[in-house]
Amino acid sequence: MNLRHLVGAIAAAAVGLTGCADASNAPDPTARIAPPTAAVSDSFVDAVRQLAAGRGITPMPRAARVRPALARLGQALAFDKVLSGNRDISCMTCHLPQLATGDARHLSIGQGATGLGPTRVHPAGAFIPRNAPPLFNLSALPALFWDGRVAMDAHGQFHTPAGEQLTPDMTRVFEFGAASAIGLFPVLSREEMRAMGGNELAAIPDADNRAMWSVLMRRLGDIPEYRRLFEAAYPGTPFKRMSFAHASNAIGGFFLDQFSFTETPWDRFLAGDDHALSAEQLAGAQVFLTIRCSLCHNGPAFTDNQFHNVAVAQFGPGKGNGPDGRDDFGRMNVTGQLADQYTFRTTPLRNVELTAPYGHDGAITDLRGFIDHYSESDLKLRSFDPTGLEPLLQGSLVLNFDAVLANRDTILNGVVLPAALVDQLTTFMTALTDPRARHLQRTIPTRVPSGLPVDGR
């Protein structure tokens, strides 16, 4: 199909699209669409760029430069199982470079397990309550994790579960905003890294974050190579004066250094390359920018960095919410506000085609299916079929549909997406992939200072 035919098809579909154009917030679905003439190509390209500008969707700024010595330290720490209680899991066990910094699972499986990605199993059938979010372009995210529990506000203040235990001396070490704090918390989680017993970290009371961080620094300090790496990464500061904030900052720096991608076809298109997108991708971009998608998926990373309830099914061990503790109230667990119940961070869309499954619990396994979920999401939730989950999760579906839908984001009211538009939106998403993000094996070190095995080698 040539571009003129695509334009005509989009115009017809947009006019008949019930409930997908918001009169107060979204552009008129038929606006800026040139008639099917010989000059339509140039005018259509210009129209898409104007729609993007109106949503604040600009090229992704480059992340801050990371000192090579700091990135080397962060790489070692991210892949080293010495940071886990029983030395059996690293940060990257659930964020595998060969799986686009995820693990291709609905729910991750933490400490005590064997295998990687889809083949990982736990002897007790234990799961982490949420899907492992990708690590791409963290510099664009002021709030991290699905519920935003680690964040830096516009005034440079950090908001984390550690409260005052994250001291000003520690935050002064941070160079990369919220990303600098990313390594502080998985190491504290029993199901993720610390374990229930069998090591000195597990014996520390759950609320004593400082003690756990101090033990980890002692572990690292017992390895001469780590002392050298730390002092090279922070010239002029002796290791004995460092805290685990220095380790977390290095991990965040490594993530920014290696997983920040700014050279997608979409970026080239915004920079003036009229031929960077295929005709199909350009058509999908027009649909995306015209209907409600871009009300939440905007800005350089295609996220408003806010929290929304998009009616995703809940299953797995949960976060301790609800009558039996298997529910997950999302952002409400951070803010305590009922309005935040079942809301989760808007997913950034860069490299999104690589990061399945989708949703806070990975409920939807393919990109087209996740886009289609937004069409009549109330019906999709009520008809969710748990038999598509792995056997250990099939019986864990929480029948909280009424409660979820009572708080579903009103932006989804009346949204109905014809199959053809779902296809066009899915095609557009492929324009948000940086080719370099497909090949991340180079980020895996051949060894780590502890001498423990490196996952993914």
Image (cartoon, rainbow, N blue to C red):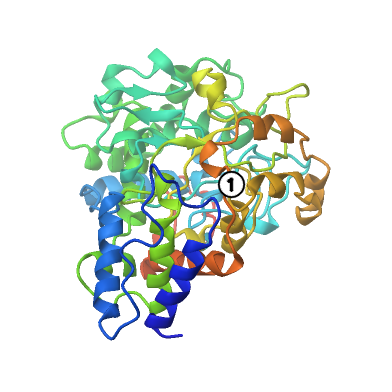
User: What is the count of numbered marks?
Assistant: 1
Looking at the image, residue 216 lies above or below residue 79:
above
Q: What residue is drawn where x is 55% and y is 44%?
A: 412
Instruction: Compare residues 231 and 281 and report the one nearer the observer.
Output: 281
Residue drawn at point x = 23 percent, y = 74 percent: 273
In the displayed structure, 162 sits above or below 103; it is: above
- Horizontal side of 337 relative to 155 (left or right) equals right
Q: Amino acid at mark 1?
A: Gly
Residue sitting farthest toward the left: 236
Q: Position of residue 195 (x, y in %)?
A: 63, 31
Residue 235, horizontal then vertical, whole percent: 17, 37
- Residue visible at 51% across and 51% down? 95
Q: Residue at x 69, y 39 (%)?
A: 314
Is any atom of residue 338 visible in this view?
Answer: yes
Q: Give residue 438's quadrant in the image.
A: bottom left
Left or right: 264 with respect to 272?
right
Instruction: Find residue 294 and report its horizontal and vertical position in percent.
Output: 40, 51
Residue 173 image offset from top left, x and y in percent? 25, 29
Question: Which residue is under mark 1?
Answer: 414
Q: Nearer the viewer, residue 156 or 309?
A: 309
User: Which element carries disc 1, helix, strand or loop?
Assistant: loop
What is the quadrant of residue 403 in the picture?
Answer: top right
Say if 194 sits above or below 122 in the image: above
